Image: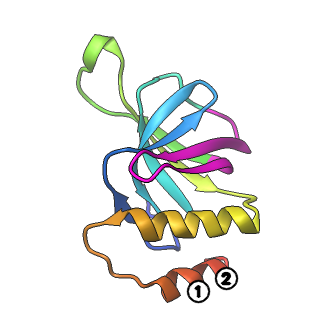
């Protein structure tokens, strides 16, 4: 997939999920602009201007009613358990309130793992400048 994110991507550990009206997905990576997740429902294809919740089991964080737009979905190759395939979904955040942007910023600061080539001030700058 063509890289479209203006904001830096961050990996998150296990226990970070999105919840959609009829599906659950594991967050693979996240940025201030969107996220990539893997879902187990091969029919998952919400339309534009849908909403998701983001849940973190580690610290009980919950970001609710996050506006999204699906950029692309793809079914992963290979067989899956019980003939259910994993779908990779690339979502863009849209129409977030100031409070949701602040919550997303905190989520990234508290849950990003691995190489942390960022600082709280850089994240805050991206939030304030809509990057």
Residue sticking out furthest to the top:
82
Q: Position of residue 82 (x, y in %)?
A: 30, 11
Identify the residue under disc 2: 128
Front-most of 64 and 117?
Answer: 64
Q: Position of residue 116 (x, y in %)?
A: 31, 77
Residue shown at 64% from the left, 28% from the top = 21
**Would residue 4 be seen by someone viewing this image from the given angle?**
no
From this view, report whether residue 2 is shown above or below residue 42: below
Identify the residue under disc 1: 125
Q: Quadrant of the C terminus?
A: bottom right
Residue shown at 53% from the left, 73% from the top = 6
Q: Are marks 2 and 1 in contact (CB under 8 Å)?
A: yes
Q: CA distance from mark 2 to mark 1?
A: 5 Å
Left or right: 104 as drawn, with respect to 30: right
Q: Secondary structure at mark 2?
A: helix
Q: Secondary structure at mark 1?
A: helix
Left or right: 110 as drawn, with respect to 83: right
Which span of residues is magenta-colored? 46-69
Residue shown at 38% from the left, 50% from the top = 58
Image-quadrant location for residue 10: bottom left
**Would residue 11 be seen by someone viewing this image from the given angle?**
yes
From this view, report whether residue 24 is shown above or below residue 122: above
Front-most of 108 and 47?
Answer: 108
Categorize mark 1 by other alpha carbons within 10 Å: few (<14), some (14-19), many (20+).
few
Left or right: 41 as drawn, with respect to 116: right
From this view, report whether residue 24 is shown above or below residue 72: above
Residue shown at 46% from the left, 23% from the top = 42
Magenta residue check for 116: no
Q: Position of residue 88 (x, y in %)?
A: 41, 40
């Amino acid at each position: 997939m063509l890289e479209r994110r203006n904001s830096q991507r961050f990996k998150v550990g296990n226990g970070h999920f999105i919840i959609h009206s009829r599906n659950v997905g594991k967050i693979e990576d996240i940025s201030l602009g969107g996220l990539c997740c893997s879902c187990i429902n091969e029919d998952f294809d919400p339309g534009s201007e849908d909403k998701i919740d983001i849940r973190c089991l580690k610290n009980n964080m919950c970001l609710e009613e996050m506006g999204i737009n699906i950029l692309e979905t793809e079914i992963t190759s290979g067989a899956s358990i019980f003939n259910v395939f994993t779908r990779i979904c690339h979502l863009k955040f849209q129409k977030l309130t100031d409070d949701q942007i602040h919550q997303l910023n905190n989520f990234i600061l508290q849950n990003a793992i691995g190489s942390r080539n960022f600082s709280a001030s850089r994240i805050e700058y991206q939030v304030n400048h809509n990057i």
